[in-house]
Image (spheres, grey):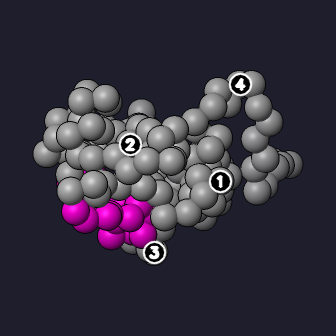
Amino acid sequence: MIKIGKLSDYALRIAVHLVATKDKLCTNDELSQTLHIPVATVRKLLKKLVDAKLVTSIRGIKGGYQLTSAPENISIAQVIVAVEGPISITECAINNSECKSSKRCDLKENWSIINNYFVDTLSGINLLDMSRKLSEQPVKFQHDLVLS
């Protein structure tokens, strides 16, 4: 099963909450209580999102966190990469890494192509899209998958 990790899911929930509260700063405690995510996990994820320049931290008594840019300019792929690193559906799909079977496997090129479509799909969905029901809105993707 291909699965987005729990930390990426939490990070996306945090980011979408920041979309919903765009006019105010959110604190670690508020995010933890509202989203039912342990405060230590919220801190860890916000640090990763700040390091990736997707979220900014405002210090002080009235400080908190907010998105660094408009939600339509931040893709869910960027959030996932900030938390988990490069997206790859197989080990060999990125970074020219080799697995034990690579000398006998003819699928590496196909997996790379499929991985690119997967990443393009995640890159084509932004935080504004995720803050709404995708089934009720058109989402434009970068590529149309055509297999012949």
Amino acid type, residue under disc 1 in the picture = Glu
Question: Can you give x and y, in whole percent of width and height, for residue 92 in the image?
Answer: 44, 63
Q: Which residue is denoted by mark 3 in the rendering? A: 96
Disc ID at residue 130? none
Question: Can you give x and y, in whole percent of width and height, for residue 116 in the image?
Answer: 62, 60
Q: Nearer the viewer, mark 4 or mark 1?
A: 1
Amino acid type, residue under disc 4 in the picture = Ser
Q: Which residue is denoted by mark 1 in the rendering? A: 72
- Viewer-closest of 11 and 25: 25
Mark 3 closeness class: few <14, some 14–19, many ≥20 residues within 10 Å? few
Residue stretch in magenta: 44-60
Q: Are marks 3 and 2 in contact (CB under 8 Å)?
A: no
Mark 1 closeness class: few <14, some 14–19, many ≥20 residues within 10 Å? some
Disc ID at residue 135? 4
Q: CA distance from mark 2 to mark 4?
A: 21 Å
Q: Is residue 24 left or right of residue 30?
A: right
Q: Which residue is denoted by mark 2 in the rendering? A: 14
Amino acid type, residue under disc 3 in the picture = Asn
What SS does tag 1 mark? helix
Q: Is residue 137 left or right of residue 10?
A: right
Amino acid type, residue under disc 2 in the picture = Ile
